[in-house]
Image (spheres, rainbow, N blue to C red):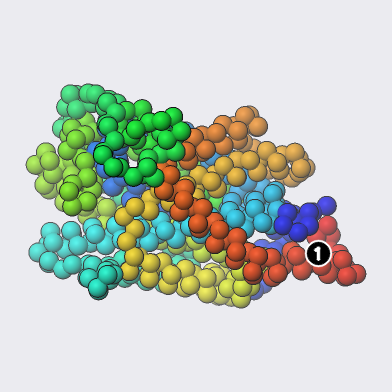
Amino acid sequence: MPGTGLLRTKSVEQSIMDTDEPDTKLRKNLGTWDLIVFGVSVVIGAGIFTIAASTAGDVSGPSVSLAFVLAAITCALAALCYAEFASTVPVAGSAYTYSYATFGEFPAWIIGWDLILEFSIAAAAVAKGWSTYLQEVLGIIGLQVPTALSLGALQFDWGAMLLVAVLTTLLVVGTKISARVSLVITSIKVAVVLFIIIAGIGYIKPDNYTPFIPPAQSAAENAPVLEQTLFSLMLGGESSVFGVFGLLAGASLVFFSFIGFDIVATTAEETRDPQRNAPRGILGSVAITTALYVAVALVVTGMVNYTKLATGPDDESATLATAFAINNVDWAATLVSVGALIGLVTVVMVLLLGQSRVLFAMSRDGLLPRGLAKTDPRRGTPVRITVLVGAVVMLAAGFFPFSRLAEMVNVGTLFAFALVSLGVIVLRRTRPDLPRGFRAPLVPLVPVLAIVACLWLMINLTALTWVRFAIWMVVGVVIYFVYGRNHSVLGQRQASVSSGGAVRPQDR
């Protein structure tokens, strides 16, 4: 029997039944290759084009490649758990939907609220990164046009707003055409990454790898305590810059580069044969991107000494193009900038897609206004939610700075990964009868390792990140008790049953 109150669960059967409601039905037109394209298109983005170089210069040194390996192991373990859930519960909403079926409504709301943080901040931040590259590329062709204009205390970033507006329109038209656009752009992006690896190999100097893990740097005088990682503070570490603490902090930072494969799970409801295609899309995305990331990190840190990749006095972060520019290969630096400009387009698009599908699932369940979940009968897309998400992200990207929010995205994602991994263990015990198109190996060992790895990376984020995360979660709790709890479709069904209404088989 499902629980009641805060822990009332929505059965897997009911979740699947709800996907057939005419007014909120999504069109199933995605295959394995579409999912892999979506995954790779969002994973290979701002993280690899910016964070790889800056993390090497500011936090980890040449060991940033090892940091990528540590982050990849965490993602691989979580990906196995996501793959099992996506094949078992092929419903929009990803971790939110999975939590509803295993832990109950309130935990599901918390994880859904957490995913809103992940996708919205990431989309806005990457859109601002795209705008920066747009200004650089315009300068290359002789057009000195700033994409960000000062408006008193705010900045009006028209470049970021333009990108979000165009991509929102594309997503309204349909996910299939979005997948085709992603395929073209992702092909260009992967080609640029391969170029970086191949062209950069000739400029590698073995001496740049020494020391592989630079000596720990003393904390700056009067450095804010909240800027240190939790792990460093717990062990009395003075600094999270270089040394072992720097390597661990670097793994937590470059984890941002892998964010996106979980978005594949949000499209399971729109996938043909999700039991087979969803796991392939998730695991394929992780495998491809991990190989590319480690190779890029090794090449970039081999091309230049890590000290030359440190953030400048004007807060100018190093990028992959920086390594080529330092070696006086300006044409290659230009190509990398153009490739990044093109590549970041799909990152923002798929983040917007993931955000809209999570909100769609929450609205269909009544935890947010049900009217938002209405889909267009011709296109089969949730137009209202897509437009709402686009408008919010457009305003955020256009007027607010996101220079230090990568960690906020990371803590939210790691929290979601840990909960999904725990959910696999719970659902194996509570519903062993469910058909599973993919079964994670060595359960409960793999999910437990995934949880431990996620928590490990989480404590290597700064204390300030945890403070911000806690504030966001408190806001979410208030919204649930003010609105979601009273408008829950599942709650209304249970109330109807208690008052003598008929019980449908799927509600039992």
In this view, the residue farthest toward the front is 222
The crowd level at tag 1 (other Cα within 10 Å; few <14, some 14-19, many 20+) is many
User: In x, y percent, where is residue 407?
Assistant: 40, 48
Question: Which residue, given by chain and number where applicable, does mark 1 sit on?
Answer: 494
User: In x, y percent, where is residue 214?
Assistant: 26, 27
State which quarter of the image contains the C terminus.
Answer: bottom right
User: In x, y percent, where is residue 292?
Assistant: 34, 38
In this view, the residue farthest toward the right is 500
Residue 375 in view (yes/no):
no
What is the total number of numbered labels drawn onto the structure image?
A: 1
Q: Residue at x 55, y 33 (%)?
A: 452
Q: Residue at x 52, y 38 (%)?
A: 455
Front one among 2 and 205: 2
Residue 95 in view (yes/no):
yes
Front one among 221 and 186: 221
User: In x, y percent, where is residue 396?
Assistant: 38, 67
Front one among 420 and 203: 420
Q: Quadrant of residue 67?
A: top left
319 shown above or below 477: above
Q: Residue at x 38, y 50 (%)?
A: 406
Q: Residue at x 79, y 54 (%)?
A: 2
Q: Secondary structure at mark 1?
A: helix
378 shown above or below 472: below
| Horizontal side of residue 100 vs 231, given as left or right | right
| Horizontal side of residue 345 vs 370, given as left or right | left
99 shown above or below 308: below
Which residue type carries mark 1?
Answer: Gln
Q: Quadrant of residue 150?
A: bottom left
